[in-house]
Image (cartoon, rainbow, N blue to C red):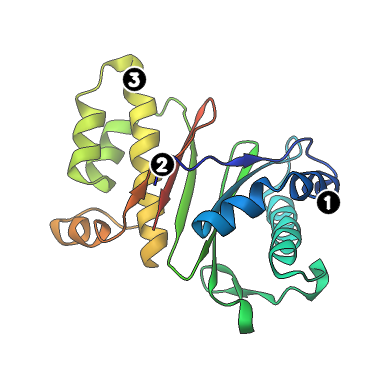
Amino acid sequence: MGELSPVILLPSPPPSTALRQRWGEGSLLRAFHDRGLALLLLPLPAESLRAAARRLARQVLREVIGGLLALPAEAVPLIEGPQGPVLEGAARDIRISLSYAGGWALIGLAEGRALGVDLVRIERLPEVEALARLYLPSASRHAVLDAPAGMRDARFAQGWAEMEARSKCLGLPLAEISAERELILERCELMACGQVEGYRIAVAV
């Protein structure tokens, strides 16, 4: 299927202006209709609080989905479910997955299939080896533990993003890894995905 490339919205405020530009170019619309899958990277205002980031992401979600459904943003049937925003009625086949890291929000949309996306900032963590042993599946864990010191943080970010994306795809909470959980996580396929500098993105379907 090839690599999935996230569409980056710039400039950040106001999102509606940038979205109209992107819909005019058709990049998000083409991605969704061609593949039933689209990724959007939304830059967040500097030092925005979690609640403000969530509000902005949901505002953008309404505009994007409104474009897909030919509805005004305020008419999009978006509600909060136990694991994040979901759509009601005729739009319920569009699945949503969100992730936040650093100055970005990652929004994933899929038609008629489960979806999980995750975004992780590459940063130095003193407990990276312990976290890898506790939470990552064997292949990702070995990739971290066997990596040269200069590559360990990036390998961990990739492994963590993949684990979280698969967990979200399956509706699973974060939990320590086990042989049984590892087999369950493998039920979701990881997609090749474009990256942004300093972060790792993972998409599971």
Residue at position x 21%, y 28% in the image: 145
In this view of the protein, can residue 126 be seen by the observer?
no
Residue picked out by circle 1: 16
Left or right: 176 as drawn, with respect to 121: left
Please give the label number shown on residue 151.
Answer: 3
The answer to whether the residues at label 1 and label 3 have Cβ atoms under 8 Å apart is no
Q: N-terminal of the two: label 1 or label 2?
A: 2
Residue at x 54% of width, y 55% of height: 34
Q: Position of residue 4 (x, y in %)?
A: 48, 43
Return the disc, 1 or 3, that comes first in the chain's sequence.
Answer: 1
Q: Amino acid at mark 3?
A: Met
Do callouts 1 and 2 mark residues in contact (Cβ within 8 Å)? Answer: no
Q: Which residue is depicted at the point 69% across and 64% down?
A: 68
Earlier residue among tags 3 and 2: 2
**Residue farthest toward the left in the current orientation of the protein:** 179
- Graded by Cα atoms within 10 Å as few (under 14), some (14 to 19) or many (20 or more), the crowding at tag 1 reads some
Looking at the rendered structure, the secondary structure element under dot 3 is helix
Q: Secondary structure at mark 2?
A: loop
Depth check, front residue: 92 or 133 = 92
Badge number at residue 75: none
Crowding near pointer 3: few (<14 within 10 Å), some, many (20+)? Answer: few
Q: Which mark is residue 2?
A: 2
Q: Quadrant of residue 96?
A: bottom right
Residue 59, by quadrant, is bottom right
Residue type beneath disc 2: Gly
Up-down: is 85 above or below 2? Answer: below
